[in-house]
Image: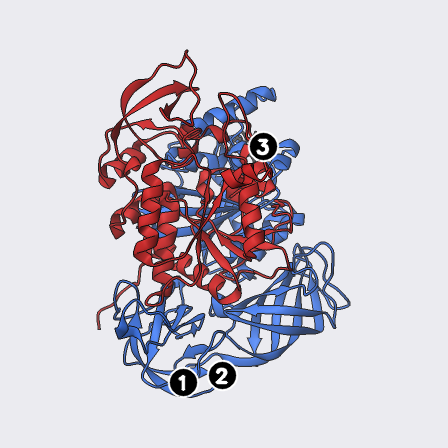
């Protein structure tokens, strides 16, 4: 059994909570006491139906205002897979939450109300999904029961959305007509839509192939922590020196020739260690400890790659950033801390090339700043080289965060677009 | 060459993520500590710490907030495990906080030291100058927890502000703090109760005996089975009876209920959990039943 992480997007009333509630309920991940609590609260408030959104809206302010403020994580499993849902609110003021949820997602579900069709916000959700390079996208056309399960309506929406998506980086796009309320095509195929030849949503989630979404080609091992047991549990480890980290790309094997960055020196992997014994290969997302044949000076923030396949050692970065702070703005000359893989440095915003209108994709080259939830293209100068890849090639070596040096808040997410 | 698809099982993914989180903390903080209660989540967390730094010893101390109302079996287990690992254990005692007048003991039948722990915990963090504190909380436990970050920022009063959390993207965690602030770190955020049990089975990890079915004298209160113990005040209208029970969570004797069960092995527990229809907190924790937002309120104050 493996894990599929997916994010859900949709605007208020498209049926997101109902859909999640149904997936959880039908997979028995909602427990009786949770359901009772929700029923009790719904009753107290005079709501006629059981409001499943109360299951996901966890904070007092959210329940009081009937809105979803923040990303909530939900878990369910079927015999085939474990699922982690990042439930992100849909409004434009929550763009940062959707970006957060999408950053680790293997798949995104965008909900559309069949009566309303493709709206501005559906396009925004699709754009963010492609910007964050979520490998698989599902467009769930919901409330089919309210359009008489009409194939014509579904096809109309499909055509319109496909035309728009062709402008984006979407590799795998699937359309599924559903009724979250009645359960049509959610867990099993619906008899109300015999014209639909595809699988149910859950079947798709269970079977979508994600193993090859990771980058297994370019060896990237950001050194996280140096293990040197001073008080080894065993004398055999007295001279032990291992480099611990989580593989960010490629497949590593003992005997492989590797290059250490920033030194550029090469050596071979002597052994790949874990608590449970040495392993024959390591690949994402394994956390392992490498030992090398030669004694090199290696520390946290360094990178291990292959001599003939190295990331760019860059101090000038071209990136798309999403600004996430409400108390400050990004402007040219802003100084920030940048965190990329295991390396932390300082960054200066050299230039804001344009601000992107996330609804129309229009580029405003006159823009002089980025505010909360705004996305734009920037040039950064970093105090020391970062070992980067294009975000489209590797999300782990292409993504970074920016931190405000006074408030210590995380103020932006960045995606490296083009390395020089 | 054989084609492989490099599929990774859910437990391996969760373990790799938790190890990564632990190493980030060890690399970036000066004085981390790991909360170890002897409960199953903290036992799993401790095993992950062992794995993350092997063959070096765990590079931070363990801390237990001892209410004085713990099960003997759990304290005995705690001490044995600490000794096996050669780890350093700091015990922060609620009784000491009471004796020093930092908190006032509740009275009456429902008296519990659960809420008092927060003061003891925060005092210990301040005194020991811990800047990162590992907790075994999981997001599937409770709906306020479902919103909490892996690196959860606490201000100088130890408070959590759910509306002002740092965005967390990819596997990049922001641990920057000012003096007096700290980060609570939850490496098991993405684990479910079943994952924890599957892991305990897979790893062959030992757990305290009260997790397995045993015969115990109990009485019923609010649909929960509470144990017969000196620290638990029982009314005349709450008769004792013997039952075959086990615990799904391990907390204070005063507020942790047992469930009727004959599951005597980890396998049987997993079978039982897979079939159960009530959450572990709903079944066994009086502290969460107080109100819709009981956990959110306690967390805001600085609770685990
Ligand atoms: N008829 C119909 N109503 C639906 C469907 N899905 C959701 N709804 C209703 O639409 C309303 C909003 O749903 P909700 O799940 O709260 O939407 P959210 O704001 O996206 O989370 C509720 O009254 C639901 O009962 C559907 O498939 N068909
Ligand atoms: Mg909702």
Give me the disc on residue B104.
Answer: 3
Gap in angstroms between the C-alphas marked 2 and 3: 57 Å
Image quadrant assignment for residue A297: bottom left
Task: Name above or below for residue A313 compared with residue A72.
Answer: below
Q: Residues within 10 Å of mark 1 (few under 14, many from 20)?
A: few
Q: Is residue B237 among the parts visible in the rendering? A: yes
Judging from the image, mark 2 belongs to the subunit labelled: A
Gap in angstroms between the C-alphas marked 2 and 1: 11 Å
Q: Where residue B181 sits: x, y (%)? A: 62, 55
| Residue at 32% from the left image edge and 54% from the top image edge | B83
Which colour denotes chain B? red
Which colour denotes chain A? blue
Give me the disc on residue A262.
Answer: 2
Give me the disc on residue A296.
Answer: 1
**Would residue B286 be found to the left or right of residue B273 on screen?**
right
Task: Name above or below for residue A171 compared with residue A221.
Answer: above
Nearer-the-camera pick, A42 or B152: B152
Name the element at disc 2: loop
Nearer-the-camera pick, A173 or B206: B206
């Amino acid at each position: 059994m493996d894990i599929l992480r997916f994010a859900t997007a949709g605007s208020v009333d498209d049926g997101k909570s109902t859909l999640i509630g149904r997936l959880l309920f039908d997979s028995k991940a909602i427990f009786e006491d949770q359901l009772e609590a929700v029923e009790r609260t719904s009753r107290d408030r005079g709501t006629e139906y059981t409001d499943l959104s109360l299951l996901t809206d966890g904070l007092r302010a959210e329940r009081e205002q009937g809105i979803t403020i923040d990303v909530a994580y939900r878990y369910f499993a079927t015999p085939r897979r474990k699922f982690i849902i990042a439930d992100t609110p849909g409004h434009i003021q929550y763009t940062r939450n959707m970006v957060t949820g999408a950053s680790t997602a293997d798949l995104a579900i965008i909900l559309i109300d069949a009566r309303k069709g493709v709206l501005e916000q559906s396009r925004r959700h699709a754009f963010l999904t492609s910007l964050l390079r979520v490998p698989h996208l599902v467009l769930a056309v919901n409330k089919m029961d309210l359009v008489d399960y009409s194939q014509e309506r579904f096809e109309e929406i499909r055509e319109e959305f496909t035309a728009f998506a062709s402008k984006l980086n979407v590799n795998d796009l699937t359309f599924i007509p559903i009724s979250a309320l009645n359960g049509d095509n959610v867990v099993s195929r619906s008899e109300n839509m015999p014209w639909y030849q595809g699988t149910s949503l859950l079947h798709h989630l269970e079977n979508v192939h994600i193993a090859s979404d990771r980058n297994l080609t370019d060896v990237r091992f950001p050194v996280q922590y140096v293990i040197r047991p001073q008080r080894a549990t065993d004398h055999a480890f007295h001279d032990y020196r291992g480099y611990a980290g989580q593989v960010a790309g490629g497949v590593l094997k003992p005997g492989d020739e590797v290059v250490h960055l920033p030194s550029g020196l090469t050596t071979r992997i002597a052994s790949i260690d874990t608590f449970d014994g040495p392993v024959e290969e390591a690949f994402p997302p394994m956390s392992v400890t490498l030992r090398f044949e030669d004694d090199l000076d290696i520390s946290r923030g360094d990178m291990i790659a292959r001599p003939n396949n190295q990331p760019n050692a860059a101090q000038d970065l071209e990136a798309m950033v999403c600004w996430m702070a409400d108390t400050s703005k990004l402007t040219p000359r802003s100084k920030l801390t940048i965190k990329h893989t295991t390396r932390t440095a300082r960054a200066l915003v050299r230039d804001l090339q344009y601000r992107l209108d996330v609804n129309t994709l229009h580029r405003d080259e006159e823009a002089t700043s980025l505010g909360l939830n705004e996305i734009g293209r920037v040039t950064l100068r970093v105090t020391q080289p970062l070992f980067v890849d294009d975000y489209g090639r590797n999300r782990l070596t292409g993504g970074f965060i920016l931190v405000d040096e006074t408030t210590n808040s995380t103020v932006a997410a960045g995606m490296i677009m083009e390395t020089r | 060459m054989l084609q492989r698809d490099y599929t990774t099982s859910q437990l391996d993914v969760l373990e790799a993520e938790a190890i990564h989180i632990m190493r980030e903390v060890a690399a970036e903080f000066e004085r981390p500590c790991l909360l170890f209660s002897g409960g199953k989540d903290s036992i799993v967390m401790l095993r992950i710490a062992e794995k993350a730094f092997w063959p070096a010893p765990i590079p931070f101390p363990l801390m237990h907030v001892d209410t004085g109302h713990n099960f003997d079996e759990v304290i005995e287990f705690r001490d044995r495990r600490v000794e096996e690992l050669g780890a350093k254990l700091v015990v922060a005692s609620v009784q000491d906080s009471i004796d020093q007048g930092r908190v006032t003991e509740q009275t009456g039948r429902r008296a519990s030291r659960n809420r008092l722990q927060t003061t003891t915990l925060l005092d210990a963090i301040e005194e020991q100058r811990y800047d990162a504190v590992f907790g075994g909380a999981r997001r599937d436990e409770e709906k306020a927890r479902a919103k909490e970050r892996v690196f959860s920022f606490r201000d100088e009063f130890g408070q959590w502000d759910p509306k002002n959390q740092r965005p967390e993207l990819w596997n990049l965690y922001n641990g920057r703090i000012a003096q007096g602030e700290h980060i609570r770190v939850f490496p098991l955020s993405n684990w479910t109760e079943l994952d924890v049990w599957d892991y305990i089975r897979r790893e062959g990890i030992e757990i305290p005996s009260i997790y397995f079915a045993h015969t115990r004298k109990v009485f019923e209160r609010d649909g929960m089975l509470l144990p017969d113990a000196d620290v638990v005040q029982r009314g005349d209208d709450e008769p004792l009876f013997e039952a075959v029970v086990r615990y799904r969570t391990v907390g204070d004797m005063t507020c942790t209920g047992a469930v009727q069960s004959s599951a005597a092995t980890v396998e049987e527990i997993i079978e039982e959990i897979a079939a159960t229809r009530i959450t572990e907190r709903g079944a066994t924790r009086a502290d969460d039943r107080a109100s819709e937002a009981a956990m959110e309120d306690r967390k805001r104050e600085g609770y685990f």
